[in-house]
Image: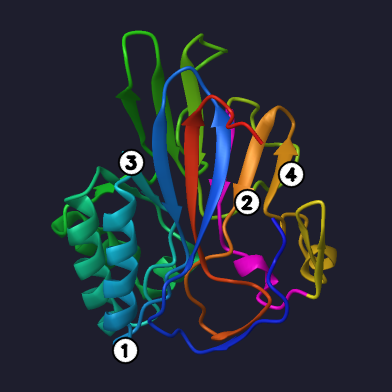
Amino acid sequence: MKLPWPELTVGNAPTAVLLRDEYYPFGARLDMLYLSDFHFTGRSRARAAALLAQVQALRPGLILLGGDYADTRAGLLPLAHFARGAARVAPVLAVAGNHDVFLGTTLVRQTLQAAGAQWLEGRCARFRLDAAHAVHIAGNYSAPEPGGLQPGLLRVLCAHYPPAGPALPPAYDLILAGHLHGGQVVGWQRQGHLFPGRWLARWNVLRDMQGSATVVVSRGLGDTLPIRYNCPREIVRIRLGPEPAS
């Protein structure tokens, strides 16, 4: 996908964000949304409402949240509004990010659970799509993994941080991560790698491989330092099923 040029965004304006489609071949169909790095504050109500409207229009089968939900306690209000509405659309599974630790992981977890989301941190969930296919979702890297390759089972890691190196156990087929915001300032991209941030962080990419696992990294939905250049905020939709014709 070619990034728009040029684009300068200052602030977290309540406008629609980019929908980025990623396809993963699988024997059953499912649309999953991965949303990460919200960075809500007390001024984010309009942005949360606009984001919820996009999710409602997309009607996914599963919603995965990758952490960094609020930068202030007041940001928990728009978070609760978004999560409550999203949970009426599809199951919502959430893990923690580093900013959630700063704010208080317990407080963030309670906010999301009260809104109808499921807290996946260090846990797993399995969704059966049909008699022969299921999706196993693990929450962040402390979660146990299913052992060995199993026909008809897609092993997904919902994470905040991208992989930390070759020590990652090779037990996942698809890894979803955020945290890096695409570097926020992008001069150019090459084969899905975003520069100059790629020089500083291995996973400043859109999509790449870690061993046999496909790694999809979100550019996020908000920023603590709200300045972006050529790096749109985005919802990532992972479409399971046959690869679409080009």
Asked whether the beta carbons under mark 2 and mark 3 sit within 8 Å of each other, the answer is: no
Residue on which the image places disc 2: 162
Please state, as top left, top right, bottom left or bottom right, where the N terminus lies in the image.
bottom right
Determine crowd level at label 2: few under 14, some 14-19, many 20+ residues with C-alpha closer than 10 A.
many
Label 4 residue SS:
loop
**Within the magenta stretch, is there residue 185?**
yes
3 or 1: tag closer to the N-terminus: 1
Quarter assignment of residue 212 = top right
Residue on which the image places disc 4: 165
Q: Which residues are magenta?
A: 172-186
Seen in the image, is 100 located left or right of residue 194? left
Label 2 residue SS:
loop
Task: Give the percent coordinates (x, y) of residue 9.
Answer: 58, 86
Q: Residues under labels 3 and 1: Cα distance? A: 28 Å
- Residue placed at 65% from the left, 26% from the top? 170
4 or 1: tag closer to the N-terminus: 1
Residue on which the image places disc 1: 43
**Within the magenta stretch, is there residue 188?**
no
User: Closer to the camera: disc 4 or disc 2?
Assistant: 2
Asked whether the beta carbons under mark 4 and mark 2 sit within 8 Å of each other, the answer is: no
Residue 20: mark in rendering = none
